[in-house]
Image (tube, helix red, strand yellow):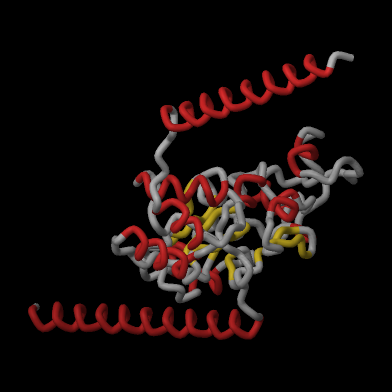
Amino acid sequence: MDTMNIVYAVAVLFIMGIVFAILLGVAAKVFAVEVDERVPLVRECLPGANCGGCGYPGCDGLAAAIVEGTAPVNGCPVGGAAAAAKIAEVMGVAVEAGERKVAHVYCNGGCNAVDKTKYEGLQDCTAAMRVAGGPKACAYGCMGLGSCVKACAFDAIHVVDGVAKVDTEKCVACGKCVAACPKKLIDLVPESKKVHVNCVNKDKGPEVMKVCASGCIGCKMCEKTCKFDAIHVIDGVAKIDYDKCKNCKMCAKACPKGCIEPVPTEEEKAKFKEMQAKQAAAAKAKAEAAKAAAAEKATEEQ
């Protein structure tokens, strides 16, 4: 083999390498996209969970959106107030302290709900719904197959006694379980609100009782008991207005089916009934006294 041919080939490759390097350098300068120096600073303030609970593609996406002004500085549900404060400092803005939210499952069925069939298929709620609407007789309730459990990256939700339950200490309100539930039984609520109607069954009372021992029958006892106009029966099921709810728990004690959390003990129910009886007796006595006074006044006028 001619040695000079090898030398020429190496020289040509070397020159081509230099030319391409120069071209790439020029292209990098010409087509360079300027990155705001605040983006990496904001990214450092985020926890790095990349859960997507903020609605953006990971922490990098959220950091860029915050700097662009399309996402709030408190947009990370995992980092919470601590991360929001650091990001606000980087951005030079003030951050409003928002109340922490947690996921809540609006179902009290599970073992209390009637099984329509024995399901032995794929342990996935969406898949089970495609088989005659799921294994439970209640078309609205939790099937307990754990799609929400699999979706949670923080071990904050588990199936207990056949129904999903949230560990509020671990919940970061990322919303993954909310999106995973095909029955739309999970929602994010203010952590300070402790009273919840654990049923979304819109059927009539008799139909509800056939499929679940602890379902809402739309009796309106809770609505009549609430002094703050915070709970109403809408479409056959009780719903709480969290802006008005004072966590007095009187509606829970009035519910005959025990579907309002926290479910009162038998002792609490007895005390509540005793209080209701005393109030009714006092109201009756007051009415009778007023009637008697009116009759006496009418007699005097005659």
Q: Position of residue 113 (x, y in %)?
A: 76, 55
Figure check: 183 above or below 45 = above
User: Could you say which is closer to the camera, residue 297 or residue 263?
Assistant: 263
Q: Is residue 11 visible?
A: yes
For the N terminus, which image quadrant? top right
Q: How many marks?
A: 0
Tell me residue 13's x, y (percent).
Answer: 69, 22
Q: Residue at x 67, y 50 (%)?
A: 208
Front residue (pair 258, 156): 156
State which quadrant residue 87 falls in. bottom left
In this rendering, position of residue 174 left or right of residue 207 = left
Q: In front here: 53 or 3? A: 3
In the rendered view of the protein, which quadrant contains the C terminus? bottom left
In this orientation, does residue 214 appear?
A: no
Residue 269 occupies which quadrant of the picture?
A: bottom right
The percent coordinates of residue 152 (x first, y second) are 68, 55
Please give the name of the residue rendered at 60% of the width and 52% of the height, measured from the top-left corner: 50
Q: Is residue 209 above or below residue 283?
A: above
Residue at (74% x, 62% y) in the render: 158
- Horizontally, residue 195 falls left or right of residue 139, namely left
Query: Where's residue 192, x and y in %?
Result: 47, 71
For residue 72, side relative to residue 102 (left or right):
left
In the image, 219 versus 283, the foreground residue is 219
Tell me what residue is drawn at x 34 percent, y 58 percent: 91
